[in-house]
Image (cartoon, helix red, strand yellow):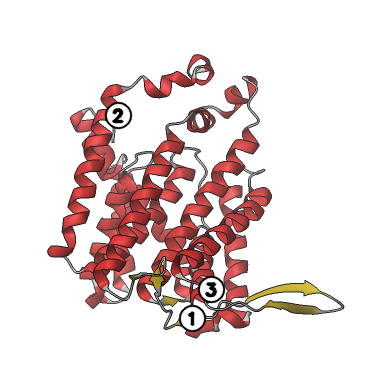
Amino acid sequence: MAQRLADPTVVHAMPARSRSEAIAFIVIACALALAPAFVYPVFLMKALCFALFACAFNLLIGYVGLLSFGHALFFGWGAYVAAHLAKVGAISLPYWFGAWKWLVIPLPPLPPELAVIGATVFAGLLGLIVGALAIRRQGIYFAMITLALAQMMYFFAIQVPFTHGEDGIQAVPRGKLFGFIDLANQMNMYFTVLAIFLGCFLLIYRIINSPFGEVLKAIRENEMRAISLGYKTERYKLAAFVLSATFAGVAGATKALVFQLASLTDVDWPMSGEVVLMTLVGGLGTMFGPVAGAFFIVTLENYLTLIGQWVFVVQGLIFVGCVLLFRRGIVGELAHLLRIKL
């Protein structure tokens, strides 16, 4: 472990792994590019948004070993901020002057790229605050702190005026990307979502396979040994938490533009449980596992809508089945069978 951490060139010394992952990425990218010809684009866009959300969550649990039960906080608030900026634009900031008041910064509705960027920055700042509070604890204590903070922000979302409470922010305009790509066109919107997903996926891959990512894996395997080697593990964990929250915010912002809606469903605790299930079903600590898990769960929900609330029972059974029978997940089991890295 010490040699691996001390020598960053080890990241580039794995041609077999890089080859298998590169081939898998090219196959998936080509399949997703051709998929709208055979599958309803809105379904694919929803699956891609959740796949990015699951990849963001996997960065934290799969490569650092931190289980968060509050990741809906970043996904949902990313959706709210993007929807608000795209539809209204004006920014309201709370401040204390004898009582809580709002400082309103008048802005016109922003184009989609700026709305997504604004939501991403906001999610990253939320991640910094939540991470700074939670990262000092481990295990179930860390998970419970993230859940408590997420629920606090859920109730804040119900009360704050700009979210419109239970109605949510509706009729969010998609606008024109860079001023000339009309996102009201379904195919333009799809390929924009695909570009965002692929770009973020490659960025997460680069993070994981960088010297920084190697330190994260060392912390996951044996934090005390990483500390003994001189690494300030709390800083690394906080950085990973902020990155994970940021990517979750991108996913939420993209989903808000796709469905032209941001609602309480995005920020409620079942969303946090759903991303845990997606990552577990696909395969913890694998690059492509969260993508497979997200597509599997979204497809399952799509076909089981007729049974109503019983869909949660089915999801629970799948969760138990994966824990007992497929502990590596779909992609993990496949990679183990083929003896390759995915």
For badge 2, the amino acid type reads Ser
Q: On the picture, is 156 further left or further right than 253?
A: right
Residue 18 - label: 2
> Tag 3: Cα neighbours inside 10 Å, few (<14), some, or many (≥20)?
many
In the picture of the structure, the residue carrying the numbered disc 3 is 85
- Mark earlier in primary sequence (3, 1): 3
- Residue that appears at 38% across and 23% down: 12
For badge 3, the amino acid type reads Leu
Asked if the residue under mark 2 is in contact with the one under mark 1, i.e. CB atoms within 8 Å, the reply is no
Question: From the viewer's perspective, is the residue at label 3 or at label 2 nearer?
Answer: 3
Task: Name the residue furthest left.
Answer: 38
Residue 136 percent location from the top left of the image: 67, 43
Q: On the picture, is 30 further left or further right than 294?
A: left
Circle 2 — which element? helix
Residue 163 percent location from the top left of the image: 55, 79
In the picture of the structure, the residue carrying the numbered disc 1 is 169
Tell me which corner region of the image, top left, top right, bottom left or bottom right, holds residue 151. Answer: bottom right
User: What separation in Å lies between label 3 and label 2 (alpha carbons)?
Assistant: 39 Å
For badge 1, the amino acid type reads Ile
- Mark earlier in primary sequence (3, 2): 2
